[in-house]
Amino acid sequence: MIKQVCPRCKQDYIHKVKIIPLSKFVFLCAECDALWEMEMPVTQKNYTDFGNYMKGYGYSGDWSLIEKYNSDNINSEEDYKSP
Ligand SMILES: [Zn+2]
């Protein structure tokens, strides 16, 4: 997958993830929760907020509903270190 910086926050790459209860792949920014459907072009204008997107399907915006793919740089447990 080509790495693309999130056009919304420019803080992180967007990642291909699977929304487990929907069995659907989307692109998601872990930094700002911007979400794009796979068939959508990823631009600054057309993102959806992850929480709102999930709410639209009757779910809470819970990250445990997400299965991560291409997880080479989204392993936040390794990156995250308490000061
Ligand atoms: Zn972002």
Image (cartoon, rainbow, N blue to C red):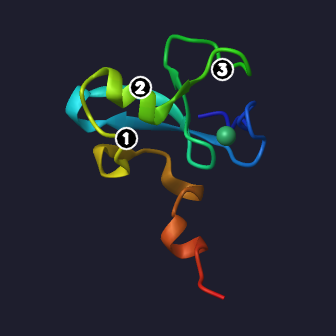
Of 70 and 26, nearer the camera is 26
Q: Which mark is residue 25?
A: none
Q: Position of residue 7 (x, y in %)?
A: 75, 30
Ligand 1 is found in the corner quadrant, namely: top right
Tell me the mark number nearer the camera, choosing from 1 and 3.
Answer: 1
The crowd level at tag 3 (other Cα within 10 Å; few <14, some 14-19, many 20+) is many
Q: Which mark is residue 53?
A: 2
Q: Earlier in the sequence, mark 1 or mark 3?
A: 3
Which amino acid lies under the numbered mark 1 shown in the image of this protein?
A: Gly
User: Mark 2 and mark 3: span between their CA atoms?
Assistant: 16 Å
Q: Residue at x 53, y 36 (%)?
A: 28
The crowd level at tag 2 (other Cα within 10 Å; few <14, some 14-19, many 20+) is some
Q: Earlier in the sequence, mark 2 or mark 1?
A: 2
Q: Secondary structure at mark 2?
A: helix
User: Mark 1 and mark 3: span between their CA atoms?
Assistant: 20 Å
Q: Secondary structure at mark 3?
A: loop
Place residue 32 in its image quadrant: top right
Q: Position of residue 80 (x, y in %)?
A: 58, 74
Tell me the mark number nearer the camera, choosing from 2 and 3.
Answer: 2
Is the Cβ of the residue at disc 1 closer than 8 Å to that at disc 3?
no
Which amino acid lies under the numbered mark 2 shown in the image of this protein?
A: Tyr
Q: Residue at x 71, y 16 (%)?
A: 45
Of 55 and 3, nearer the camera is 55
Q: Secondary structure at mark 1?
A: loop
Q: Which mark is residue 42?
A: 3
Q: Which mark is residue 61?
A: 1
